[in-house]
Structures are given as C-alpha cells and as structure tokens.
Amino acid sequence: MILFMAGNETIKTSSTNTVCYLAMNDAIKSKFLSEIKPAMEKAQSDFVTLFTTDDADSLSFVRNCWLEAMRL
C-alpha cells in the first residue's frame, strides 16, 4: 500500500510540474499540444479502448517534456 501511495504522489507531482513548465513557455506548449492533439482526437469517443500503447509510444516530445520536468 505504501508503494502504491508513493507512486501516486510521484505521478501527481511530476504531472503538475510538467503543466506548470508548459504554462511558462508558450512555444513549447504549442509544440506539446500539436503532438498530442491528433492522438486525443482519434480516441475522443472512447479513450480507454482507442488510445493504444503505440499511440503513447509515438508521443516522443510529450515524453521528453515530462522527463525534463522530472529532471528539474
């Protein structure tokens, strides 16, 4: 249970930091959104079923933004 709670807190913090850093840099935010928008539109009707691991793997800039937020 402790590992689950610790992992949950890490994900919350890293996601919040990523959003904050994106809010401070409009150019990066635009690139981030332009990469994620097609995948989100494809899976709009049923995200759980239509958003695949291949879709997630194709979001390299999104992953890099998250990793950079974690590094900072």
Image (spheres, helix red, strand yellow):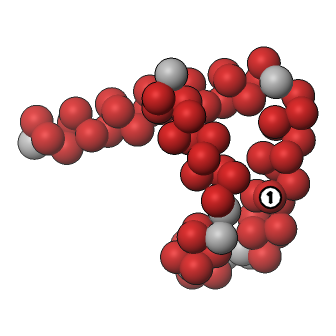
Residue type at numbered disc 1: Glu
Disc 1: which residue? 35
As drawn, the residue found furthest toward the top would be 24
Up/down of 48 relative to 6, above or below:
below
Q: What is the x, y in percent for residue 33?
A: 82, 49
Could one spot residue 47 in this view of the protein?
no
Q: Residue 40's x, y, as percent?
A: 75, 64
Viewport quadrant of the N terminus: top left
User: As rendered, which of 29 and 44 lies closer to the eye?
Assistant: 29
Residue 72's place in the image compared with 11, above or below, is: above
Tell me residue 59's x, y (percent). Answer: 66, 62
Residue name at image x 65 percent, y 70 percent? 58
Relative to 70, is 3 above or below? below
Q: In which quarter of the image is residue 55?
A: bottom right
Where, by quadrant of the figure, is residue 19 drawn? Answer: top right
- Which residue is painted at 47% across and 29% down in the image? 71
Q: Is mark 1 on a helix, strand or loop?
A: helix
Count of number-bearing discs? 1
Determine whether, in the image, residue 9 is placed left or right of residue 64. left
For the question of whether residue 58 can be seen, the reply is: yes
Q: Is residue 43 left or right of residue 49?
A: right
Crowding near pointer 1: few (<14 within 10 Å), some, many (20+)?
some
Residue shown at the point (69%, 52%) measured from the top left: 61
